[in-house]
């Protein structure tokens, strides 16, 4: 496909004139799996609650109503509990992160498996002490409400280094104050 040179030159000028500095981009290896697990879990929860009245109404080979109610209760409780555990464990998983200047944008998943964007300046994040931290999290916000995040440490080294650098106290140079 041949394009007129004016269009190409215009595009080059536009790209050259924009000042867009990107410090780090993080793309999680399990983002598709975590999103699908959350979607499957919430889907099975919905189906369990939708099929429960049918299980009560059907005459299942001579089972009493009490037995059928117990089975429905057990199915609903188990599905609700498993969905809650999956959400709790995976809500801190960061699927994508972008560090641009002093702002870190983090994409996590909500309970329905949809993306949720959170943005923090580096001074509002800290790397928690591993002994007192929440499981499945290696980054936390210092804002209220406190949020926890998990990034694969081997893939997010530039992000963790930037946060550590932002946490260090600023040293005042005596020569600059004169």
Image: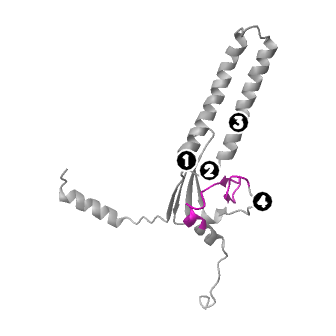
Q: Foreground mark, 2 or 3?
A: 3
The residue beneath circle 1 is: 31
4 or 3: tag closer to the N-terminus: 3
The secondary element bearing badge 1 is classed as helix
Magenta range is 134-160
Answer yes or no: do the residues labelled 2 and 4 have beta carbons within 8 Å? no
Rendered image: mark on residue 94: none
Answer yes or no: do the residues labelled 4 and 3 have beta carbons within 8 Å? no
The residue beneath circle 2 is: 93
| Residue at the (63%, 29%) spot, across then down | 44
Position of residue 36 relative to residue 17, above or below, is: above
| Residue at the (68%, 24%) spot, across then down | 49
2 or 4: tag closer to the N-terminus: 2
| Residue at the (40%, 66%) spot, across then down | 19
3 or 1: tag closer to the N-terminus: 1
The residue beneath circle 3 is: 82
1 or 4: tag closer to the N-terminus: 1
Position of residue 95 relative to residue 64, above or below, is: below
């Amino acid at each position: 496909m041949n394009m007129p040179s004016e269009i190409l030159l215009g595009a080059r000028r536009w790209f050259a004139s924009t000042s867009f500095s990107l410090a780090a981009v993080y793309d999680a290896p399990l983002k598709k799996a975590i999103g699908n697990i959350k979607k499957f879990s919430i889907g099975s929860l919905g189906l369990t609650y939708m099929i429960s009245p049918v299980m009560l109404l059907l005459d299942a080979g001579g089972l009493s109503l009490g037995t059928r109610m117990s089975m429905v209760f057990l199915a609903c409780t188990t599905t609700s509990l498993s969905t809650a555990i999956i959400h709790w464990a995976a809500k801190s998983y960061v699927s994508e992160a972008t560090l641009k200047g002093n702002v870190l944008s983090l994409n996590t998943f909500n309970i329905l498996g949809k993306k949720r964007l959170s943005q923090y300046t580096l001074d509002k994040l800290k790397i928690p002490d591993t002994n007192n931290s929440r499981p499945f999290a290696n980054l936390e916000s210092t804002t209220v409400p406190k949020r926890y995040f998990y990034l694969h440490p081997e893939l997010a080294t530039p992000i963790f280094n930037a946060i550590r650098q932002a946490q260090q106290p600023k040293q005042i140079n005596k020569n600059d104050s004169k």
